[in-house]
Image (cartoon, rainbow, N blue to C red):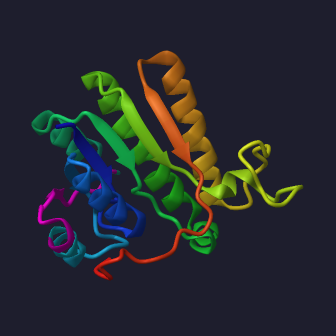
Amino acid sequence: MAKILVTGGLGFIGSHTVVALQKKGFEVIIIDNLSNSMLDVLDKITKITGIQPKFHNIDLRIKEDVKTFFEKNSIDGIIHFAASKAVGESVEKPLDYYENNVSSLVYLLQEMKLRKIEHFIFSSSCTVYGQADVLPITEKAPIKMAASPYGNTKQIGEEIIQESCKAYSLNAIALRYFNPIGAHESIQI
């Protein structure tokens, strides 16, 4: 059974992903610093799936904590949802967004390289398309200058991942969401 690390696994998209992974038979480990989520989501995931995923309250901005986690846990792949995500707030606090969204990504990728973990899914954003020339936006739309620090962190993140894929043995996918909404059929999450 493959062991998947889901960062931000107690958030909206992360928790739904954890449920789907567990239902498919994956062993899931969650890292979340609870800055934009609540611990009771862990109990709700367990209620839905009958399996309590392992949980680590770690701030991915703390490089030593990231390193310690990987020293103690064997991982087959990572789905990285953990990020600050409010466009307006990113304009007010750009340095906080760069520190959180870019540094944490770099620390994860460094550990992946060191431990030869090859599979990575990145939670990007539709904000990488900037102000689109044509609607609806498709994956063929050009990436344009970001309109916010949040969007720029996602553009930078995608560039870091592309360069890492070229330099190391890394298979990665970037997911560019628009407005993810909805509830699990159980109404628990």
Q: Give the number of callouts.
A: 0
The C terminus appears in which quarter of the rendering? bottom left
Using residue 157 as the reference point, say whether residue 61 is left or right of it: left
Using residue 111 as the reference point, say whether residue 171 is left or right of it: right
Residue 86, compared with residue 157, is above or below; it is: below
Residue name at image x 36 percent, y 39 percent: 107
Using residue 22 as the reference point, say whether residue 60 is left or right of it: right
Residue 6, compared with residue 70, is above or below; it is: below
Using residue 75 as the reference point, say whether residue 125 is left or right of it: right
Taking depth in this image into account, of 17 and 70 the one nearest to the observer is: 17
Q: Residue 139: x, y in percent?
A: 71, 45
Task: Using the rendered view, name the quadrant where residue 109 is placed.
Answer: top left
Taking depth in this image into account, of 18 and 142 the one nearest to the observer is: 18
Residue 70, compared with residue 181, is above or below; it is: above
Q: Residue 164: x, y in percent?
A: 49, 25
Whether residue 168 appears in magenta in the rendering, the answer is no
Residue name at image x 35 percent, y 76 percent: 185
Whether residue 53 appears in magenta in the rendering, the answer is yes
Q: Residue 179: x, y in percent?
A: 59, 69
Taking depth in this image into account, of 121 and 58 the one nearest to the observer is: 121
Residue name at image x 21 percent, y 75 percent: 44
Residue name at image x 44 percent, y 58 percent: 83
Taking depth in this image into account, of 27 and 113 the one nearest to the observer is: 27
Q: Residue 152: x, y in percent?
A: 64, 51
Q: Which residues are magenta?
A: 47-60
